């Protein structure tokens, strides 16, 4: 009796558009982090970003009269808030102070591979051949971009480890967030996840106050930008799209980030990319196109129906 209903074309287009907004804004975050990181310590930058994001999202929730998420969603919100909004941002900020943007983008972009594997293990996500092929192509592109931008020898093992930890936190946060999106709206999940992340980073409040007193206006504006756009807006559009596809496919979409970082560095920092860098960026985008082709992804797994539900029991048990 249970059938998987394919999403309508309009829903697929909206989800693809939301994912595109996320990718562009997350790519811009690499440039802003490099700029603001010269004046703000990693923890202070993460806290300032999260406070700006939480304030923005809180105002939107008040205008839309969004209520609290249901209790069943709080576990996923809390885990994703600590891992993705909190730990990930601190580790990435710190890592970008130790390695160049290309190396950081390369290491963090093992996240989609981890998301696909964790999603298959814990969410029941399928790993169709097109997704695996697209991930392989995009990963090759990410490696090419990273190698082409890291030839100066400035990368440190410590920075690479920090970016690796950020990738692990990112993957764990996405997989924890997915079930919560089946129980609460994208705006609710993002708002309270951001709030949990801000609370997690409160130990850096003293550093934030001290850094803000000495930071130039441009660095502070970059921090606010990170909170309003790559956090408040991009995490909401991400959650909207993630609720309508699998974690693996959404993770593969972010392989486009390194190529966009190259373009933005070219436009805003005057770093002209080489032929190898452009080729890697093209591979990233080609892999995303392959991974998202072949029709829409259905739900992560078919719901399990209890054959004889007793009165008061839920009829359908969602995948855990």
Image (spheres, rainbow, N blue to C red):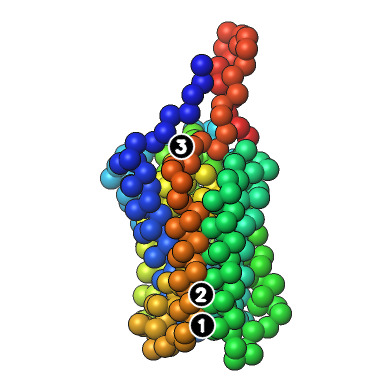
> Which residue occupies the extreme left position in the image?
63
Q: Secondary structure at mark 1?
A: helix
Q: Secondary structure at mark 2?
A: helix
Q: Nearer the viewer, mark 3 or mark 1?
A: 1
Q: Residue at x 59, y 73 (%)?
A: 143
Quadrant of the image occupied by residue 135: bottom right
Residue 3 lies, in percent from the top left, at 49, 24
* Mark toward the start of the polypeptide (3 vs 2): 3
Residue 257 lies, in percent from the top left, at 47, 67
Tell me the number on the disc at residue 276.
1
193 lies left or right of 233: right
Quadrant of the image occupied by residue 128: top right
State the CA–CA distance, disc 1 to disc 2: 6 Å
Q: Secondary structure at mark 3?
A: loop
285 lies left or right of 62: right
Residues at marks 1 and 2 touching, judged by CB atoms closer than 8 Å: yes
């Amino acid at each position: 009796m249970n059938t998987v209903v394919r999403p309508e074309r309009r829903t697929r287009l909206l989800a693809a558009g939301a994912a595109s907004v996320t990718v562009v804004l997350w790519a811009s975050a690499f440039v802003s982090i490099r700029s603001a990181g010269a004046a703000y310590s990693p923890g202070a930058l993460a806290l300032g970003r999260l406070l700006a994001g939480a304030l923005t999202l809180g105002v939107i929730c008040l205008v839309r009269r969004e209520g609290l998420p249901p209790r069943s969603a709080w576990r996923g919100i809390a885990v994703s808030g600590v891992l993705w909004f909190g730990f990930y941002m601190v580790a990435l900020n710190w890592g970008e102070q130790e390695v160049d943007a290309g190396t950081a983008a390369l290491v963090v972009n093992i996240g989609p591979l981890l998301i696909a594997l964790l999603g298959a293990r814990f969410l029941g996500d399928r790993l169709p051949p097109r997704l695996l092929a697209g991930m392989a192509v995009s990963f090759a592109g990410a490696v090419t971009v990273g190698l082409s931008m890291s030839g100066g020898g400035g990368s440190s093992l410590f920075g690479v480890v920090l970016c690796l930890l950020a990738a692990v936190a990112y993957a764990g946060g996405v997989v924890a967030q997915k079930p919560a999106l089946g129980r609460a709206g994208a705006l609710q999940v993002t708002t309270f996840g951001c709030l949990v992340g801000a609370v997690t980073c409160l130990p850096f409040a003293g550093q934030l106050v001290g850094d803000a007193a000495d930071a130039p206006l441009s660095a502070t504006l970059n921090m606010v930008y990170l909170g309003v756009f790559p956090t408040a807006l991009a995490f909401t559009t991400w959650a909207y799209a993630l609720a309508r596809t699998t974690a693996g496919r959404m993770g593969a979409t972010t392989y486009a980030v390194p190529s966009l970082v190259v373009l933005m560095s070219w436009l805003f920092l005057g770093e002209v990319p080489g032929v190898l860098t452009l080729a890697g960026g093209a591979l990233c985008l080609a892999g995303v196109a392959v991974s998202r082709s072949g029709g829409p992804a259905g739900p992560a797994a078919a719901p399990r129906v209890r054959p004889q539900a007793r009165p008061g029991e839920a009829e359908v048990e969602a995948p855990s």
